[in-house]
Protein backbone atom coordinates (compact mmCIF):
# COMPACT_ATOMS: atom_id res chain seq x y z
CA UNK A 1 0.00 0.00 0.00
CA UNK A 2 0.98 3.65 0.06
CA UNK A 3 1.99 5.97 2.82
CA UNK A 4 1.10 9.25 4.43
CA UNK A 5 2.86 12.08 2.57
CA UNK A 6 5.37 13.85 4.82
CA UNK A 7 5.75 16.94 2.66
CA UNK A 8 3.36 18.70 0.30
CA UNK A 9 5.62 17.94 -2.65
CA UNK A 10 5.23 14.22 -1.85
CA UNK A 11 1.43 14.37 -2.04
CA UNK A 12 -0.41 12.52 -4.78
CA UNK A 13 -3.49 14.46 -5.91
CA UNK A 14 -6.51 12.65 -7.28
CA UNK A 15 -10.02 12.93 -8.70
CA UNK A 16 -11.47 9.87 -6.99
CA UNK A 17 -14.29 11.74 -5.21
CA UNK A 18 -15.33 13.59 -8.38
CA UNK A 19 -15.29 10.42 -10.47
CA UNK A 20 -17.19 8.44 -7.84
CA UNK A 21 -19.86 11.13 -7.56
CA UNK A 22 -20.16 11.39 -11.33
CA UNK A 23 -20.80 7.64 -11.53
CA UNK A 24 -23.03 7.42 -8.46
CA UNK A 25 -20.63 5.07 -6.69
CA UNK A 26 -20.12 4.96 -2.93
CA UNK A 27 -16.76 4.59 -1.21
CA UNK A 28 -17.85 1.15 -0.10
CA UNK A 29 -18.72 0.03 -3.64
CA UNK A 30 -15.39 1.25 -5.02
CA UNK A 31 -13.48 -0.31 -2.13
CA UNK A 32 -15.14 -3.69 -2.63
CA UNK A 33 -14.49 -3.58 -6.37
CA UNK A 34 -10.75 -3.02 -5.94
CA UNK A 35 -10.23 -5.01 -2.73
CA UNK A 36 -9.52 -2.38 -0.08
CA UNK A 37 -11.26 -1.10 3.04
CA UNK A 38 -13.70 1.81 2.48
CA UNK A 39 -11.60 3.93 4.86
CA UNK A 40 -8.72 3.63 2.41
CA UNK A 41 -10.83 5.35 -0.25
CA UNK A 42 -11.62 8.16 2.21
CA UNK A 43 -7.93 8.58 3.10
CA UNK A 44 -7.03 8.75 -0.59
CA UNK A 45 -9.75 11.27 -1.39
CA UNK A 46 -8.65 13.56 1.45
CA UNK A 47 -4.98 13.31 0.45
CA UNK A 48 -4.07 11.67 3.74
CA UNK A 49 -2.64 8.63 2.00
CA UNK A 50 -0.66 8.12 -1.21
CA UNK A 51 -1.61 5.00 -3.16
CA UNK A 52 0.82 2.30 -4.15
CA UNK A 53 1.35 2.01 -7.88
CA UNK A 54 -0.74 -1.17 -7.96
CA UNK A 55 -3.63 0.51 -6.12
CA UNK A 56 -3.50 3.59 -8.37
CA UNK A 57 -3.60 1.36 -11.45
CA UNK A 58 -6.53 -0.68 -10.07
CA UNK A 59 -8.51 2.49 -9.35
CA UNK A 60 -7.79 3.96 -12.78
CA UNK A 61 -8.73 0.70 -14.48
CA UNK A 62 -12.00 0.54 -12.51
CA UNK A 63 -12.91 4.02 -13.77
CA UNK A 64 -11.79 3.08 -17.30
CA UNK A 65 -9.32 5.96 -17.41
CA UNK A 66 -5.55 6.34 -17.78
CA UNK A 67 -3.85 6.68 -14.42
CA UNK A 68 -2.83 10.25 -15.31
CA UNK A 69 -6.50 11.25 -15.54
CA UNK A 70 -7.09 10.12 -11.94
CA UNK A 71 -3.78 10.87 -10.19
CA UNK A 72 -1.16 13.62 -10.42
CA UNK A 73 1.84 14.97 -8.55
CA UNK A 74 0.50 18.50 -9.13
CA UNK A 75 -2.93 19.75 -8.03
CA UNK A 76 -5.50 18.81 -10.65
CA UNK A 77 -7.50 21.47 -12.45
CA UNK A 78 -11.29 21.12 -12.37
CA UNK A 79 -12.55 18.82 -15.11
CA UNK A 80 -14.69 21.61 -16.56
CA UNK A 81 -11.53 23.65 -17.13
CA UNK A 82 -9.69 20.79 -18.78
CA UNK A 83 -12.59 19.61 -20.92
CA UNK A 84 -14.35 22.83 -21.82
CA UNK A 85 -11.91 25.62 -21.02
CA UNK A 86 -14.31 26.93 -18.39
CA UNK A 87 -13.23 28.58 -15.19
CA UNK A 88 -15.16 28.87 -11.95
CA UNK A 89 -17.34 31.90 -11.49
Image (tube, helix red, strand yellow):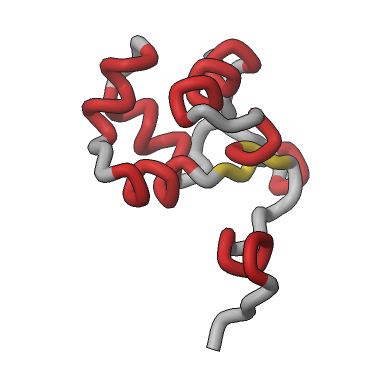
Instruction: Give the farthest residue toward the bottom.
Output: 89
Picture quadrant where residue 77 is located: bottom right
- What residue is at 59 percent from the left and 18 percent from the top? 57
Q: Is residue 26 above or below residue 18?
A: above
x then y, percent, for residue 83: 64, 61
State whether residue 25 appears in this view: yes
- What residue is at 47 percent from the left and 35 percent from the top? 44
Q: Is residue 34 left or right of residue 58?
A: left
x then y, percent, for residue 7: 71, 42
State whether residue 12 appears in this view: no
Q: Is residue 72 above or below residue 37?
A: below
**Considering the image in quadrants, where does the C terminus appear?**
bottom right
Q: Nearer the viewer, residue 80 or 41?
A: 80
Count all numbered tags in the image, as a single digit.
0
x then y, percent, for residue 81: 64, 68
x then y, percent, for residue 5: 63, 35
Q: Nearer the viewer, residue 14 or 87?
A: 87
- What residue is at 31 percent from the left and 22 percent from the top? 31
Q: Is residue 49 above or below residue 8?
A: above
Q: Is residue 64 left or right of residue 34?
A: right
Q: Nearer the viewer, residue 70 or 23?
A: 23
Amino acid sequence: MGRTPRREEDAVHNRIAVLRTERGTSRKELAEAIGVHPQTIGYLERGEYSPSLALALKIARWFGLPVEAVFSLEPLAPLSTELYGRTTR
